[in-house]
Structures are given as C-alpha cells and as structure tokens.
Amino acid sequence: MPGLDEKLHDIYDEVLRRNAGETEFHQAVHEVLDSLGPVVAKHPHYADAAVIRRLCEPERQIIFRVPWADDQGNVQINRGFRVEFNSALGPYKGGLRFHPSVYLGIVKFLGFEQIFKNSLTGLPIGGGKGGSDFDPKGRSDAEVMRFCQAFMTELYRHIGEYTDVPAGDIGVGGREVGYLFGQYKRITNRYESGVLTGKGVTWGGSQVRTEATGYGTVYFTHEMLKARGESYDGKKVVVSGSGNVAIYAIEKVHQLGGTVVACSDSSGYIVDEAGIDLDLVKDIKENRRGRVAEYVEARGGGARFSASGSIWEVPCDIALPCATQNELNGTDAKALIASGCTIVAEGANMPCTPDAVRLFVEAGVGFAPGKAANAGGVATSALEMQQNASRDSWSFEHTEARLAEIMRGIHTRCLETADEYGSPGNYIAGANIGGFIQVADAMLALGLI
Ligand code: GLU
C-alpha cells in the first residue's frame, strides 16, 4: 500500500489477513496508519512495543442473536453486535447503530474511529461500538420496543457504567435509548443512569446531548474559519443527511449567520436557496418520520427535490457531510472543488472516500475528519456520564459552553500536533496523531494486557 512505512505496512497486511472482507474497517485502519509514519520515526518504541498492532485488535467482540415477534406474530431474527475495542482511557464508549447494512466490518470501523475520537475529547472514555442489522424503517413503535427489549436482554450482561456505555447512532435516538434503558433497569433492578447516554432530560439525560454532534461539527468549522480570518457570515453551506446530526448542524449554521441551502435523505436531496426551513425538516423527520420530498410540497415556491444525482453538485462555500460512510466520492469532491468550496468537515463517520479526501488535500480545501469534527456528540455523552456520577444536572447554557470549549480544544490540539509532526494545517494528521499518542501512552503504562 503506497504511503505506509515498512513497519506500518506489515501491520496493515496483518489487519487485512485477520479481518477478511471487512472493507470499511480496512479503510479506517489505513487512514490512521497513513498518518503514523512520522510518529514511529520519532518514537520507535510505539512500533516495538506492538502498541499499534494491539490497537488494531479489539479487546472483545460480542455477536448475538436477537429474536423478537413482529406485529403479525411472526418471529424475526436479527444479529446484534458490540465491539469493545479499547479501554485504556476509560470504559468503552460509543453508540449503537440499527441499520440493515450493519455487519461486523461496519461495527469495527466505527469502534476503531471511536478510540481516537474519544481520546481527542480529552475525557476519560475508551472506544467501542455496537448495533444490529435491524431496520427500524416502517416498524411500529411496539415493534421497535420489542426489538430493543430483546437486544438489551443479551447486551445487559456486557455493559455497565464502569465497563461499557452505549448510546445512539444511525437508527438509535431518544426513543430507542428509552426502551433500552427501561429493559436494562428492569433486568438488573438498578437505576444505573450512567450505563447509557442520550437519555431523555427528565430521566438522567444531559441538556445539549441531542444537539451536540451537529452543533459540535459547526463549532469546529467555526474554529477553522476563524483560523483563516473568516466567519460563517454570508456563507453558503450544504449539509447532507436530515437525521440528528444534520438537523442540529443546520440549526447552528443558521445561528452563526450562514445559510444552509440543501439537505438530503436516502430518497434524494432538496435545494432551497432561500435557506432550509428547519422547523419543516424537523417536523417531517422527527414527528412524521417521513421523506425530505415532502418538504417541497409543503414549502412550494423556490424549493426543489431531486431523486437522482448528488447533493454535492449544489455549489457551496462549506460542505458538511452528515449522512453516512462513503457518501462523498472523488467525483463529488471534484464538483465541490470546482464550485469553490473551501471547507469540508465530516459530521458523519468516514463519509468521504479516500479518493475524495486526497483530492481535497491536494486542492488546499480545509478538511476536518469525523474523529475531530463530530466528537462533540460523544464528548457531551461523557458530560452526561459526569452528571450521572455526581447525581447532578447542568443547565443548557453551561453544557453548551463546555461543548464549545471542548471543540476549541480539539481544534487547537489538531493544529499543534500537525505542526509538531511536520504537516502544518493538516487536520487529518493532527487528529490521528493527537488521538493516537494519548491512547498509546496509556496502553504502555498499563502493561501488556
Ligand atoms: N454515535 C456517536 C459517535 O459516532 C456518539 C456515541 C456516544 O455518544 O457514545 O460518536
């Protein structure tokens, strides 16, 4: 593989051999190893002590059957996963994804990313991820509840506030976390608030957790703009997706004076040059659980819907991919660069293909990888854990101020680390190296375990 130094190349080969067919996991590992050349050159002990090899092998991988009955009384069987990847810095921490595309390779890529992301927050959380190939789309509330109860009936024995703390991701929001927490409480007979995050604010959740991933991504890009002497004022922004991350990214862009002109879902994308009406999108996605096409009917006038083509054909100054992995490819990157886009930040996990990332870097586009840009979600989860541990609950203002401070801290750490390792201004190198060093040092301190 070009670009990797010899020791890292061998490690990558071993990852390919031991994890056959898990292409998203390979991609996530390669992206990190690609940044570590200057680190092993400067500090060979990381390679000698097999820290990197150990990092690539999850501490524990759990796969289980999830049997449940649908509304017609038919038995449904799904597969559940929890990959407890690394606990050097704290309990495993990371979301659960319910989506038909979920298999071990997806969970491992997400868990691997989570290690470095969580480390970058500076908070005491390890990395993990889980989920199921269950598709919540079109399922009734009662079916979602029965599925969540069946899922937790196995998962509960593996998690705990000091062990492993799941949360949401695609397909898992407040409703699902509620059913999961209810079943955990019922089985264990413990009100152990800190076992899950993303809870409702009346039963142990944190203010700002719902908004945190989207808000955090925009705070991060705000820092990138400030570093260039610019601001969001008057900027045209495209946000892909219309789920939890996208909705609150749009909200914060509008608060900071930018205009989001397009968003999307798996059925297509909408363009509204006057600025996306967020209340309408929230109503369609959060209440009606509908499709973005409904936006055009309700809004009429200047808005349009496209079921084909790519949202990245819409010209913008700033692009925030907030949908899912590999949603933005080389062709999309070329279109964005040609339209004058100067900043791209990943609100989703690994939404840009390696080709797209390379093109952005070559064109001098400011590019922020997800493990830095979208770390606000998990950081606020860690704040929720803090509140649970101290049986406290903080105000919205206080929590949001903490989130903004954490995102500023990550931005600074990325730039300082990138400088130190010879890639000034490169957020990819900064995030990968900065995240790695803290975990690697902790692993060395804890011995060969
Ligand atoms: N799923 C989110 C992420 O990708 C958040 C996980 C959490 O809050 O634990 O970081």
Image (tube, helix red, strand yellow):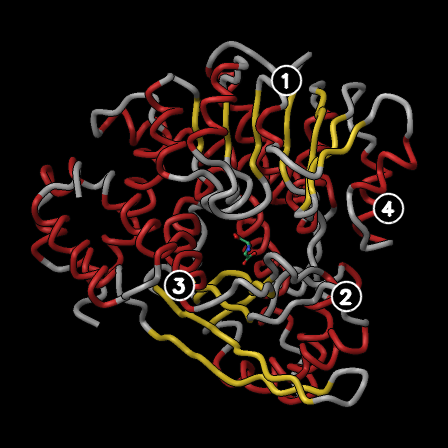
For mark 4, give the secondary structure. helix
Specify the label residue 232 is tagged with: 1
Question: Alpha carbon of mark 4 to alpha carbon of mark 3: how far?
Answer: 34 Å
The residue under the point 29% across, 21% down is: 424
Closer to us: 122 or 356: 356
Question: Which of the marked residues, 4 or 2, is nearer the chain's N terminus?
Answer: 2
Q: In which quarter of the image is residue 168?
A: bottom right
Secondary structure, mark 3, is: helix
Q: Mark 4 points at which residue?
A: 283
Q: How far apart are marks 2 and 1 (CA)?
A: 38 Å
Give me the C-alpha separation between circle 4 and circle 1: 26 Å
Residue type marked 1: Tyr
Q: How many badges with numbers are in the image?
A: 4
- Give the label, 4 or 1, closer to the camera: 4
Badge number at residue 105: 3
State the residue in front, 103 or 168: 103
Give the residue at the far front of this rendering. Answer: 308
Q: Which quadrant holds residue 126?
A: bottom left
Q: Residue at 34% of width from left, 21% of height from top?
A: 425
Q: Which residue is drawn at 85% across and 42% down?
A: 294
| Label 2: how many Cα within 10 Å (few below 14, some 14–19, many 20+) | few
Q: Where is residue 171 in the image (x, y as percent from the top left)?
A: 65, 60
Give the secondary structure at mark 2.
loop
Disc with the residue nearer the chain's start (3 vs 2): 3
- The three-letter code of the residue at mark 2 reads Gly
Disc on the earlier residue, 3 or 1:
3
